[in-house]
Image: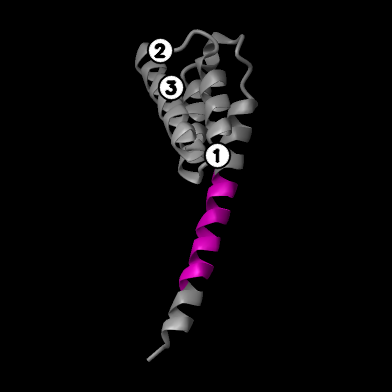
């Protein structure tokens, strides 16, 4: 049987691993989104969906400014209405959580 201290240490190691997975996932998704120029209509909806995804990863990680940036970039261009709504929801949630965090 493992001690409380050992289980706690293991839990903290797992949290560190999750944090690193979030960092990796955000950077991968964001780098994909950044490769699509806004000015090319053929890039939609892929481009804005990638920004939406990167933005929600950022929200989950507590990186609200990055989430807001992703929402802004995703909303640039001629995007489908359902995805526009989802990006606006992302922006709203990132602002809400940022405000809560600030106190």
Of callouts 2 and 1, which one flags the residue occurring earlier in the amino acid sequence? 1
Q: Which mark is residue 80?
A: 2
Q: Position of residue 2 (x, y in %)?
A: 41, 88
Residue depicted at 65% across the width and 26% down the height: 35
Q: Position of residue 36 (x, y in %)?
A: 61, 22
Residue depicted at 51% across the width and 23% down the height: 71
- Label 3 vs label 2: CA separation? 11 Å
Foreground mark, 3 or 2? 3
Q: Which mark is residue 63?
A: 1
Image quarter for residue 16? bottom right
- At mark 3, the secondary structure is helix
Of callouts 3 and 2, which one flags the residue occurring earlier in the amino acid sequence? 2
Residue depicted at 49% across the width and 34% down the height: 98
Whether 34 is drawn above or below 80: the answer is below
As rendered, which of 28 and 62 lies closer to the eye? 62
Neighbourhood count class around disc 1 (C-alpha, 10 Å): few under 14, some 14–19, many 20 upward: some
Q: Which segment is the magenta one?
A: 11-25
Of callouts 1 and 3, which one flags the residue occurring earlier in the amino acid sequence? 1
Farthest front residue?
Answer: 103
Neighbourhood count class around disc 2 (C-alpha, 10 Å): few under 14, some 14–19, many 20 upward: few
């Amino acid at each position: 049987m493992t001690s409380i201290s050992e289980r706690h240490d293991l839990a903290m190691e797992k949290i560190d691993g999750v944090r690193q997975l979030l960092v990796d996932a955000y950077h991968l998704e964001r780098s994909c989104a950044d490769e699509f120029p806004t000015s090319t209509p053929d890039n939609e909806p892929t481009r804005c969906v990638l920004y939406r995804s990167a933005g929600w990863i950022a929200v989950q990680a507590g990186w609200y400014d990055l989430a807001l940036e992703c929402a802004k970039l995703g909303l640039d261009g001629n995007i489908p209405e359902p995805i526009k709504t989802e990006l606006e929801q992302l922006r709203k949630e990132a602002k809400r959580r940022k405000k809560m965090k600030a106190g």
